[in-house]
Image: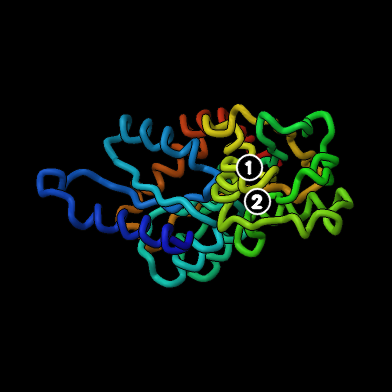
Amino acid sequence: MPPKKIVGRALLAILAASCLAPMNFAQKKTLRVAAAADLQAAMPEIAKVFEARTGTSVEVAYGSSGNFYAQIQNGVPLDVFFSADNEYPRKLEESGFAEPHSAAIYGIGKIVLWMPANAKCDPERDGWQCLQDPVVRKIAIANPAHAPYGRAAVAALQKAGIYDAVKAKLVLGENISQAAQFVQSGNAEAGILAYALALSPALQGGKKWVVPTELHPPIEQSVVVLKSAKDKPAAQEFVKFVTRGAGREILAKYGFEPRPAR
């Protein structure tokens, strides 16, 4: 099934759950959240703690930020959008699809060069040289057309001066999670992935090298409350919980750094 259809069905499931809940749960609040794919490891824990503290459940669909941006503009009713950059939330505010001044940076992301545990090359020791090894035939990244982590990967390769040498090896995932699946399954020998996903149980056993942040633009990830939010106070409470409350500590566990003081 094409990834866009998977995301679409996930959104439909969220909408159906909110509309068809049994009458005895009618009073229970449910937030409909769209989240960048790099949050797949952290967000379930955040949602669980938030529900335990507030009684409000959080239904989450994961995908590429660009696809969610387009779907929100096409009228998909959601409450909160966690993007992998700060541009999409800003544009949603400017175009009237998000609450004014509600966007907030929830973390600074990092990218890593990741290879399986049995790889002969060690990215931490050899860095970019691993990608130029003839054994590495495919390198998985997220699609830079609509995934901020894909854009960061391309920028890093260009800044390192090896993009032209390896671009024929690049295979594009619809989002950063699918790129991780490519390399985890063996369909690619290496991947440039979100650091948060490299800390997930599925990828923890691999070899990884954190790409120096000076090689790519800062991955400032923002969240925004959407105009279509059914319960804006609850949506705002969730955003506050993630950006300034206990959710911030959970994000830190998965490598998301706080926004530098300005």
Q: Residue at x 52, y 28 (%)?
A: 249
Alpha carbon distance from label 1 to label 2: 7 Å
Q: Residue at x 46, y 29 (%)?
A: 246
> What coloring was used for the rendering?
rainbow
Tell me, yes or no, whether the two marked residues, 1 and 2, touch with CB atoms within 8 Å: yes
Q: Quadrant of the N terminus?
A: bottom left
Percent position (x, y) of residue 214? Answer: 81, 43
First-in-chain label (1 vs 2): 2
Figure check: 242 above or below 21: above
Horizontally, residue 109 falls left or right of residue 6, namely right
Horizontally, residue 16 falls left or right of residue 152, namely left
Which image quarter: residue 114?
top right
Figure check: 137 above or below 55: below
Q: Amino acid at mark 1?
A: Ala
Percent position (x, y) of residue 178? Answer: 55, 50
Query: Does residue 221 appear in this view?
Result: no
Horizontally, residue 181 falls left or right of residue 219, namely left
SS assignment at label 1: strand
Percent position (x, y) of residue 200? Answer: 54, 32
Instruction: Determine which of the numbered discs, if any, sits on residue 109 in the image.
Output: none
Looking at the image, which is closer to me, 149 or 187? 187
Q: Amino acid at mark 2?
A: Tyr
Q: Quadrant of the C terminus?
A: top right
Residue at label 2?
149
Instruction: Determine which of the numbered discs, if any, sits on residue 194 in the image.
Output: 1
